Image (cartoon, rainbow, N blue to C red):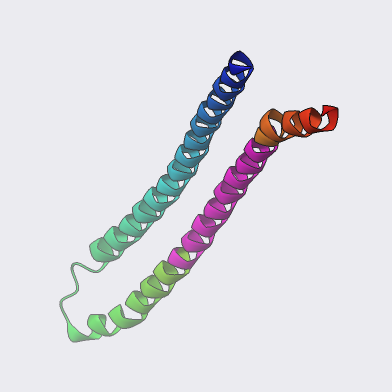
């Protein structure tokens, strides 16, 4: 009897360790995707700002400064749009990661049900 219980506990521990390893992999994959999205957004923003500054670094007369406001407003609008798009992509990555983790947890509960609950129910029926 103790050997059977010990075997069940060992199997459940192995399943838990496997599930934890898979969950860590899923979480790390989501983290990598999110980091990559944010890094690309930062690079694009930095390049656009650097291009804007290099284009407008030699403005000296007041007439040329008047053209600076529309250009800076355009840069700001594009930056805000890019930030919004990146945020939407990050939300998508988070949702997909959460769905993958929840399906893993569901599979783990089903496996635990197979391991513990069904043998107990079968043993009760034989009594």
Residue 85 in the magenta stretch? The answer is yes
Residue 14 x, y percent position in the rendering: 54, 23
Residue 97 x, y percent position in the rendering: 55, 47
Which secondary structure type mostly characterizes the magenta part of the structure? helix
Residue 104 x, y percent position in the rendering: 62, 39
Question: Which residue corresponds to the image point at 58% horizontal and 17% vertical from the top-left?
Answer: 2
Q: Quadrant of the C terminus?
A: top right
In the displayed structure, 114 sits above or below 58; it is above
In the displayed structure, 105 sits above or below 49; it is above
Residue projecting furthest to the top: 3
Residue projecting furthest to the right: 125
Locate residue 62: give its quadrant.
Answer: bottom left
Question: Which residue corresponds to the image point at 80% horizontal and 29% vertical from the top-left?
Answer: 122
User: In front here: 47 or 41?
Assistant: 41
Question: Which residue corresponds to the image point at 62% horizontal and 49% vertical from the top-left?
Answer: 99
Total residue callouts: 0
Question: Which residue corresponds to the image point at 47% horizontal and 35% vertical from the top-left?
Answer: 24
Residue 61 x, y percent position in the rendering: 17, 81
In the displayed structure, 97 sits above or below 69; it is above
Query: In the image, is 63 to the left or to the right of 80?
Result: left
Query: In the image, is 104 to the left or to the right of 43?
Result: right
First to last magenta residue range: 83-111
């Amino acid at each position: 009897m103790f050997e059977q219980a010990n075997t069940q506990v060992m199997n459940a521990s192995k399943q838990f360790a496997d599930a934890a390893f898979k969950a860590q992999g899923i979480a790390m994959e989501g983290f990598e995707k999110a980091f990559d999205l944010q890094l690309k957004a930062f690079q694009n923003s930095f390049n656009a700002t650097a291009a804007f500054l290099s284009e407008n670094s030699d403005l000296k007369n007041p007439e040329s400064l008047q053209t600076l406001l529309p250009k800076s407003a355009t840069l700001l609008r594009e930056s805000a749009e890019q930030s919004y798009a990146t945020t939407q992509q990050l939300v998508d990555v988070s949702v997909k990661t959460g769905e993958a983790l929840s399906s893993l947890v569901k599979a783990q509960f089903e496996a635990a049900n197979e391991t513990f609950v069904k043998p107990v129910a079968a043993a009760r029926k034989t009594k």
